[in-house]
Amino acid sequence: MISFVMLRLPALASALVLGLACAGAAQAHKSSDAYLNWRVEGRTVEQRLDIALRDLDRDLALDADDDGQLTWGEVRGRWADLVRVAADGVRFTADGQRCTPVVPTTPNTPATLQLDEHTDGRYAVLRQTFECPAPVRRIEADYRLFAASDPTHRGIVRIVSADGVEQGAVLVPGAGPQSFSTEPDAGAAGRSFAGFVFEGLHHIAIGLDHLLFLVTLLMVAVWRRDEAGTGWVPRQTAASAWKEALRLVSAFTVAHSLTLGLAASGVLAPPSRWVESLIAASVLVAAIDNVRPFLRGPRWVMVSVFGLVHGFGFAGPLQDLGLRQGELAWPLLGFNLGVELGQLGLVALLLPLACLWRDRAFYRGVVRSGSGAIAALASVWMLERSLQLSLLPLSLP
């Protein structure tokens, strides 16, 4: 039985990668996020909720002619449904009491219908003002947006009070009420930090392209190039494999941390289309190099170069939150820490098995077939992202 499983491992590796592609193509790069801003002043709460049109289209079938392109007319004609989704998905009370929505005097006019461009596409912007029974001291949020249709979705909330108290957090749909103080709170910064750590973990966990890039690196971290530089031979000790893996992860971490900070603070903002295309290219290059080494020099150099590109991809949630530079330190640190914890978790999961099997013949089949499947998927991503095509049934718009 064990021999049969080992013989079938290369095929199983390919099937696993292709299965991940089908199950996770929609999360290949940017996760599903909505951005919720509450501005509190006395008894008044001004709410702005930005929801991705791709998420709304999935639940409401906004694309009436099914041509793959959402027009302003299609969105405007269903605006009442968008308002209903927002009202059902985002609920809050102030100090345990319900607040009354202030109905606009001229609903469904260009002033109340708005779209905005985020790093990953267009979002519907839904604004609403609420009057509460008394000056607001604490908001209890019950976030349920897309809880039934997308378990990966998250809400990123920012709360600003009149006296300058600001905080942010990550909301999990259906997780129950979460409380936020609008007054100075010594523990708020820690809770906000923990939320961004969780968001970083979430982002790396569902970012299939980032995960596959790391997987391709870890698969051959237990090998080294042969003397001719055109093949792989097993490392003599597991310790040297762990050192190589940590060297690669460290190079990736330093590089993407640099561009993550620059992008999140607005210093650099390359077009997301090209960032996503280059991320796909990084996966393709790493996978091909696994099958037949062609890159010269230490592999950590290549990892550092591509890590700079991945950092721009990681920056999306922090950019779209709209934080000023002075507010970025804790969210940036927490988000980056979450990403690193996710990476180290992947190393702890895969590397012991790779070390155990590094000199087995069947493991070469696993690496070849798995890398080949990853290269094929990355090629499709490159075409889709650079040419704005839709080749996979669950691909990003």
Image (cartoon, rainbow, N blue to C red):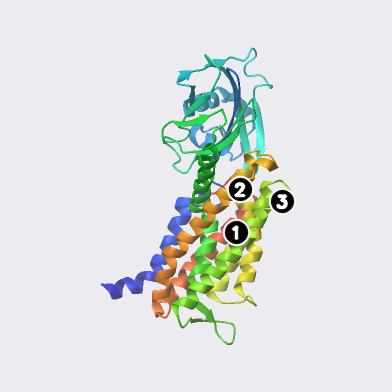
Of marks 2 and 3, the one in the foreground = 2
Q: Amino acid at mark 1?
A: Ala
What residue occupies the far front of the structure in this picture? 186
Q: In the rendered structure, which disc, 2 or 3, sits on the residue that comes first in sequence?
A: 3
> Dot 3, crowdedness within 10 Å: few (<14), some or many (≥20)?
few
In the depicted view, which residue is nearer to us: 63 or 104? 104
Q: Which residue is mark 3?
A: 270
Disc 3 element: loop
Residue 389 versus residue 262: which sits nearer the camera? Answer: 262
Give the residue number, with chain letter if any, for mark 1.
280
Q: Is residue 15 above or below residue 240?
A: above
Amino acid at the residue labelled 3: Pro
Q: Residue at x 60, y 73 (%)?
A: 299
Type of amino acid under label 2: Leu
Q: Is residue 380 left or right of residue 344?
A: right
Which residue carries the number 2 mark?
332
Q: In the shown orientation, is residue 7 left or right of residue 66?
A: left
Q: Are marks 3 and 1 in contact (CB under 8 Å)?
A: no
Measure the alpha-carbon separation of dots 3 and 1.
16 Å
